[in-house]
Image: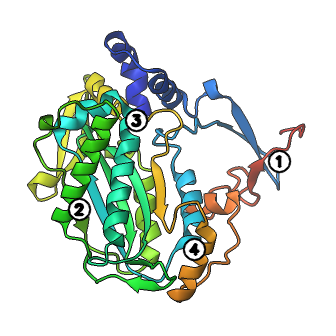
Amino acid sequence: MIELQDIINQFGGAFLATHKLSPVQAKAFYAIRNCRTSLLGAHADICDECGFAKISYNSCRNRHCPKCQTFTKEQWIEKQNQYLLNTGYFHVVFTLPEELNSVMLRNQETAYSLFFKAVSETLRELCADSKFLGATPGLTTVLHTWGQNLMYHPHIHCIVTGGGLTKDGKWRNSRKKFFIPVKVLSRKFRGKLLFYLKQSGLLFDSALCRKDCVVYCKPPFKNASKVIEYLGRYTHRVAISNHRILALKNGMVTFSWRDYRDNNRQKTMTVTAVEFIRRFMLHILPSGFRKIRHYGLLASRDKCAKISLCKKLTRSVSSNVIPATTLERLRKIFGADFDLCPCCGIGHLGRASPGKATA
């Protein structure tokens, strides 16, 4: 299988000869290039039966690396399960007009934060309106900056509870279909975003953005258990996964993509390796920037108390599951026998203790 790492290894030099990277982009670039190679060091896994030692190279753990997100995703999903409520959930997506792309790209940390602010305030204020819900919902929001073709396309995915907590401490269910008209969402969001961008000095003329901001709602989830599984696919996704890269030949990269403007058809696209790397580097987030944020009932302030109350009101099953160990998570990802010793076929490989002799 062709991987992003292979493309960077072979054509990274040609890319760097014509493109300049920011410090955070350079950190991701070299981390992905060196992931699971001798440059990042190694560790030994020892068989508990025959003493066989298997040497493995260390991962880079960069959040933009396609190889290093699966384990982190499983940890995150396990944590979020404790906040699930026995209610419906909706998936709402906020996108921006192309005219704002240059503003967002030049001022990423500030502009993305204002994007989150406009989205969260739009949803919370409209949900508080008695015409729509009259209660505070739980919101989980995730920033993505790419389209399927790897071009710059910032948008925020929102998972919204199908109900909320009223001011007098009661639970109010929403309608089965999404309870806020999309046009109302779009207009309010556009007004807020443009106001914040102008107020911060990032945008001087609102006329530059003549198009409406597009907001759309996907079909609701069938049950709460599907929410976290679905969210896991979005929260720790990188701009392109390795399985979408189909070929690397004669300096050209071919990858698969879905064309949402053409009935969601699966297509292939071929670009130069340098252009492929350029597109990928567009989606490296500022250092320390939180791309997953929670609001309303899921905001960090008094979250445990609010969720505990909501669980009682919605008759939700409390999660008393003991957190999985690292080994259990690895077995879930790679299969039950991933650590079976290749030498004796009986024992299991485990990390060697400091100072322990290896065979």
Question: For the point 44% across and 54% down, which residue is it?
Answer: 235
Q: Position of residue 61 (x, y in %)?
A: 58, 39
**Foreground residue, 335 or 255?**
255
Q: How many marks?
A: 4
Query: Callout 2, which amino acid?
Result: Leu
Q: Please tell me whether mark 1 sits on a helix, a strand or a loop.
A: loop
- Cα distance between the residues tagged 1 and 3: 53 Å
The residue mark sitting in front, 4 or 1, is: 4
Checking the image for residue 306, the label placed there is 4
Question: For the point 34% across and 14% down, which residue is it?
Answer: 14
Q: Please tell me whether mark 3 sits on a helix, a strand or a loop.
A: helix
The residue mark sitting in front, 1 or 3, is: 3
**Foreground residue, 45 or 333?**
333
Q: Position of residue 248 (x, y in %)?
A: 30, 31
Which residue is denoted by mark 1 in the rendering?
51
Q: Relative to 352, say whether 106 is above or below.
A: above
- Residue 1: name its quadrant: top left
Which residue is denoted by mark 3 in the rendering?
110
How many residues crowd around disc 4 within 10 Å: few (fewer than 14), some, or many (20 or more)?
Answer: some
Q: Is residue 181 left or right of residue 118?
A: left
Q: Is residue 89 visible?
A: yes
Q: Are marks 1 and 2 in contact (CB under 8 Å)?
A: no
Which residue is denoted by mark 2 in the rendering?
185
Task: Pick whichever of labels 4 and 1 is earlier in the sequence.
Answer: 1
Task: Pick whichever of labels 4 and 2 is earlier in the sequence.
Answer: 2
